[in-house]
Amino acid sequence: MNAHFDPKHIINPFVAPIQQTLADVLTAVLVCNLPQVQKRDQASAVKRIGELCRKDLGDIPADIAALRELVQRLDPTAVDFKPKPISHKTWSNIRSNFLAALQTAGLTITRTRRWPRSPGWQHFLERHSRRYRDGLSRFAGFCTVNEIKPEDVNASVWEAFEQVLMASFENANEIKRDTACLWNKLVDSSPDVALERLPYTSRRRPPTRILLEEFPAAFQQDVENHLAWVQLEDPYVPDARDRPLAPGSARLRKQQILSAATALVQSGTSCDEITSLASLVRVPDFRAIMKQRMQKHGLKENAYEYGLAKALVFIAEEWVKPGDAVMRELKQLLKRIKNVQPGLTPKNRDLLKRLEDPVALAALIDLPDQLLAEAERQPLSALSLAKAQAGIAICIGLFVGLRPANIATLAFDETLFLADRNDQESLIELPGEVVKNGDPFATVLAPEATALVRRYKDKILKPYLRKEPKFVFDGGKGSPKPATTLSGLVQRFTKRRLGIEISLHQFRHIDANILLDEHPGAYESASQFLGHKNRRITTDFYAGPNPARAARLHADTMRKVKASLSVPHKPKNSPTGQATKPRPHNRRKAR
């Protein structure tokens, strides 16, 4: 017979074992033998993390893996963080003291910077630049402790290092990716040393288009001939275009051709059957391409798909010339594809909405000076240079609003003529071949921006290069940084300091919005500021419904009307406005 079951002694197999919480960490910090200042800072950091997570310390497990997710979701440096934002420096101190508190409580925290390097690793790192010494410091410390030489690094060592990272660092994925990338660069640059490459997951997405080289040679040749023709490489051919496509438009045309060819292959056509551009603009093939492309979006409007279809119609009309009947049918199919209505994208509208907060906008305007001042206080290095360049790019974006490609390639005394004094304007002149619309563009840089650029040139860029700089955003190799790299720097620092990720191109929208908020209806000024060839481009983007701007304009008008009504009117018969006494009635005296 079964024994009686007492529910008081039940064992729940689904409850996780009791582990330390941040309350236990705080207790351990308060009773430790650390100096009073360190004890205070660590205890304050633990309490602050609990406040920011909006949880009791007893409900937060003292586990690095769990804390990583909690801390990464926090962004207390954001300008709209409630109750108020925390500066980037303060947040760094909180995180550093918090990790020290975990270590005080007995949790294992990897501190590879404090570990000594073996002679082999020390000699190995000294042969390379500071970028590699700093980037591989954690990996070198790990290998030193485990008595692993540089030449013994392999996949199993890397797997063990990954496990240590995931258990010890909140930004483990970033450290892992950067370490593997730097190590593989060393392997490629040192073929004489027997080093094994590490598995590395690239940040780049795998290509979604079929490469041009995978199509028949006849198709490749036709594409190359077409791209040369649209760029007017030979203006004396009989059927030359009236005006060439800009280099950026030509690159987009090539991407559109490959996107269309890839969609045709995905719809069931073999690569070998696509032998020329005519294969893409036959009516059945055009219909198959657009049907395959639009499956991702349904019948929703999409700018890229409409642009692709329009490019195919242009190719048919200008290059293939299939005949009037085919062209009429292609143009009818083009009308069925919905294009995105002119105006700002939801992403840009959300950004401008966030910057309507005066605190957020003031923080953005002050950011360039802050970044440059921090870079001046730091040791001269690639990191301080990058910080200063991010600040200067933001400054130029705020005051001039050039396109990213033009900002990145600014050159002293060629396109940027820096004033001699800080209270003078600087001149920017761009030749037509580097401007998107093909027209030369000239503007001025305000004295405030001039002073910042001169400080950056004299105190950071010139000492770093050890020669007179040519490019404003020289990366240290005598050439300008790519526009994508510079925009990435701006996005990184705006995200870290403001909690708002702003690309370099979005400053054009910010500038136009600020100008029109202060001067509603000044579309001509905004058009000239942005360098638009046609004012319609400006109005298409910025002249949409804006009830808030209209309401502010109306409120200003009402204030002016109220002020005018509150002033007493002057009598017409008094030039001074003072009331005149009535004259007594003159009666003739009786004689």
Image (cartoon, grey):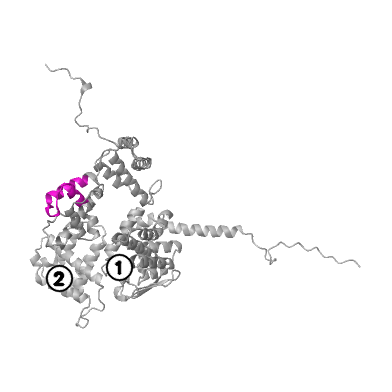
Q: Residue furthest top?
A: 1
Q: CA separation, marks 1 and 2? A: 49 Å
Quadrant of the rendering where the N terminus is positioned: top left
Asked if the stretch drawn in magenta spans residue 281, the answer is: no
Q: Return the residue at label 1.
A: 465
Whether 22 is drawn above or below 80: the answer is above
- Whole-percent x and y of residue 148? 14, 50
User: Taking the image as drawn, is residue 543 in sight?
Assistant: no
- Asked if the residues shown at circle 1 and circle 2 are in contact, with their CB atoms under 8 angstroms apart, the answer is no
- Whole-percent x and y of residue 99? 29, 44
| Residue 242 placement: quadrant | bottom left
Q: Residue at x 19, y 68 (%)?
A: 254
Crowding near pointer 2: few (<14 within 10 Å), some, many (20+)?
Answer: many
Q: Which mark is residue 277?
A: 2
Q: Earlier in the sequence, mark 1 or mark 2?
A: 2
Left or right: residue 421 versus residue 121 is right
- Three-letter amino acid code at the position of disc 1: Leu
588, 269: nearer the viewer:
269
Secondary structure of the residue carrying numbered label 2: loop
Task: Report the magenta residues as a range.
Answer: 138-166
- State how many labels appear: 2
- Whole-percent x and y of residue 95? 32, 46
Q: Main secondary structure of the magenta part?
A: helix
| In this rendering, the label closer to the viewer, 1 or 2 | 1
Left or right: residue 501 versus residue 253 is right
- Three-letter amino acid code at the position of disc 2: Leu
78, 517: nearer the viewer:
78
Quadrant of the rendering where the C terminus is positioned: bottom right
- Whole-percent x and y of residue 237? 19, 82
